[in-house]
Image (spheres, helix red, strand yellow):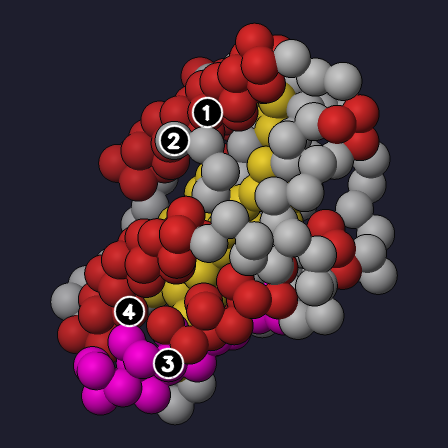
Amino acid sequence: MSSTAEETQRATALLHAEQKASTLFDEIETTLLRPGISEKQLNDAIHHLGATRHNVRTHWHKRVVRSGRNTLSPFAENPPDRTIEEDDILVVDLGPVFEEWEADFGRTYVLGDDPAKLALRDALEGIWVDVKREFDADPDITGEGLYAIAARRVEEEGRKQGLGWVFGAEIAGHLVGSFPHERIPNDRVTLYITPGNGEKMRSKGKGGWDRHWILEIHVHDKVRGFGGFYERLLTVG
């Protein structure tokens, strides 16, 4: 069984990994994001930046850099490479490993001043905070219950803004931990925040450890043809 000190150590390691990922993303935003380059070129530049300046030796999931209509593509797909435009919206989703601990961090960026794109980007963090608040308030919440809350909040915010948003993914998060971890099979719904997962999210994992979760907010504006994404640790911090 795990001890309180060990649980604290694990949670702290995950938080530190996320903080390092946040620093990496800050540098991506200030030094790499610009129109006129392709998604692949930006992806390669992010890989180089992570390796040379942030000691990232591996990622536990594929690096995702998408712009424009490609932001509507599911994570598992690999849409055709696209050149980033002057007035574009971009999603960056990385899973860097720092000192054997996984981070999973995703942000949305807008180049230009398109009001619908800015509204979507600016709403993401607030929706995430609202969903976390409901998670914190219910010690017995299940994966399917939190997914329903996330989907509802996206639709509510879309109606409020008059933009008709929908939740744009089949999951709203997943487990995260030390690396290398056991691969999460697609059919293990109990390891995801998704419909069909009726298990309590605060149930213990292997060895009696607390399970730690990433919460993802996916917002799609299908009428205008773009989406946005925001994710970070739900259970620490």
Of badges 3 and 4, the one in the foreground is 3
Query: In the image, what residue type sits under mark 2?
Result: Gly
Circle nearer the N terminus (3, 1): 1
Circle nearer the N terminus (2, 3): 3
In the picture, measured across the screen, residue 125 lies left or right of residue 171, that is: left
Circle nearer the N terminus (1, 2): 1
In the picture, measured across the screen, residue 98 lies left or right of residue 163, that is: right
In the picture, which quadrant includes the C terminus?
top left
Mark 2–mark 4 distance (CA, rounded to whole Å): 25 Å
Residue at disc 3, secondary structure:
helix
Mark 1–mark 4 distance (CA, rounded to whole Å): 27 Å
Q: Are marks 3 and 1 in contact (CB under 8 Å)?
A: no
Report the residue at 31% width, 80% height from top.
156
Residue wearing tag 4:
120
Residue 116 in the image, given as x and y percentages of width and height: 23, 77
Q: Is residue 64 magenta?
A: no
Query: In the image, what residue type sits under mark 4?
Result: Leu
Residue wearing tag 1:
15
Q: Are marks 1 and 2 in contact (CB under 8 Å)?
A: yes
In the rendered image, the vertical position of residue 69 relative to residue 125, given as above or below: below
